[in-house]
């Protein structure tokens, strides 16, 4: 099934009924702090939610494969996403009756809603974000780029850097001059 969005209206739900959203969301990229990452596979969603009094309990899974930039060589890195969703939505009025410490304590996985229309995409996005490593790699042993000239060392493992040699030569020359000046 193709899902247009993940918005649900709490007011339209029956108490204690289990609702399910299953399908692929119609997006082809996802915005992360490392940039906008294209999806190589559909964003597959499997969410269950239950309303109990005015609290909405949400659990689910998110799967996809996305492409981002390797943090060493800047080539594409393919990341498998197998994320979990676990959240409780509570009405925002409850927030006022809590002490500050309680708010902080309960912050994890608790979301306060103002509007009865809730967009579960925010939880999906979070579940994807935590699955993406801080420094994504195109392969575990990526050799990265030559720090002197930027040559890709995966493609040119034999690379001996001319610029490094120039750099060393220059360093040697200036050392030599220093020594002469000193002596
Ligand atoms: Zn790489
Ligand atoms: Zn080089």
Image (cartoon, grey):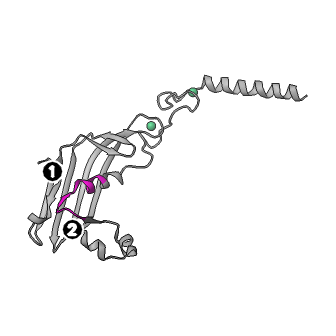
Q: Residues within 10 Å of mark 2 (few under 14, many from 20)?
A: some
In-image side of 65 versus 44 (left or right)? right
Q: Where is residue 174 in the image (x, y as percent from the top left)?
A: 77, 26
Q: How crowded is mark 1: few (under 14 residues within 10 Å), some or many (20 or more)?
A: some
Observer-nearest of 39 and 51? 51
Task: Say if 113 sits above or below 66 in the image.
Answer: below
Residue 12, position as x, y percentages in the image: 8, 64
Ligand 2: image quarter: top right
Does dot 1 land on a helix, a strand or a loop?
strand
- Magenta stretch, residue numbers: 113-125
| Label 2 – label 1 distance at C-alpha | 19 Å
Residue lying at 60% horizontally and 25% vertically, measured from the top left: 161
Q: Nearer the viewer, residue 18 or 11?
A: 11
Residue 68 falls in image quadrant: top left
Residue 9 screen position, x and y as percent = 13, 61
Whether the residue carrying mark 1 lies under 8 Å from ligand 1 is answered with: no
For the point 50% across and 27% down, the residue is 156
| Residue under label 2 | 57
Q: In this view, does 172 lie above or below 100?
A: above
**In the image, which is nearer the foreground, mark 2 or mark 1?**
2
What residue is drawn where x is 16% and y is 50%?
5
In the picture, the quarter occupied by the C terminus is: top right
Q: Residue 101: where, in percent of width, then height?
A: 40, 74
**Residue for badge 1:** 23
Residue appearing at x 51%, y 31% in the figure: 153
Say how many tags the image has: 2
Magenta-span inclusion, residue 117: yes
* Lower sequence index among marks 2 and 1: 1
Please, which residue is most extreme toward the right here?
A: 183
């Amino acid at each position: 099934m193709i899902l247009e969005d993940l918005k649900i209206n709490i007011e339209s739900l029956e108490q204690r009924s289990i609702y399910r959203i299953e399908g692929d969301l119609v997006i082809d990229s996802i915005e992360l702090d490392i940039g906008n990452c294209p999806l190589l596979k559909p964003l597959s969603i499997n969410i269950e939610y239950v309303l109990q009094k005015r609290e909405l309990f949400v659990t689910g899974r998110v799967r996809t494969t996305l492409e981002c930039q390797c943090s060493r060589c800047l080539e594409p890195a393919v990341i498998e996403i197998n994320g979990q969703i676990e959240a409780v939505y509570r009405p925002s009025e409850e927030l006022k009756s809590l002490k500050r410490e309680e708010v902080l304590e309960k912050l994890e996985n608790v979301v306060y809603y103002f509007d009865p229309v809730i967009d579960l995409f925010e939880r999906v996005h979070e579940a994807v974000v935590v699955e993406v490593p801080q420094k994504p790699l195109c392969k575990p042993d990526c050799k990265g780029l030559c720090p002197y000239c930027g040559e890709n060392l995966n493609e040119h493992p034999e690379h001996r850097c001319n610029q490094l040699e120039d750099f060393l030569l220059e360093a040697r020359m200036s050392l030599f001059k220093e020594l002469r000046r000193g002596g």
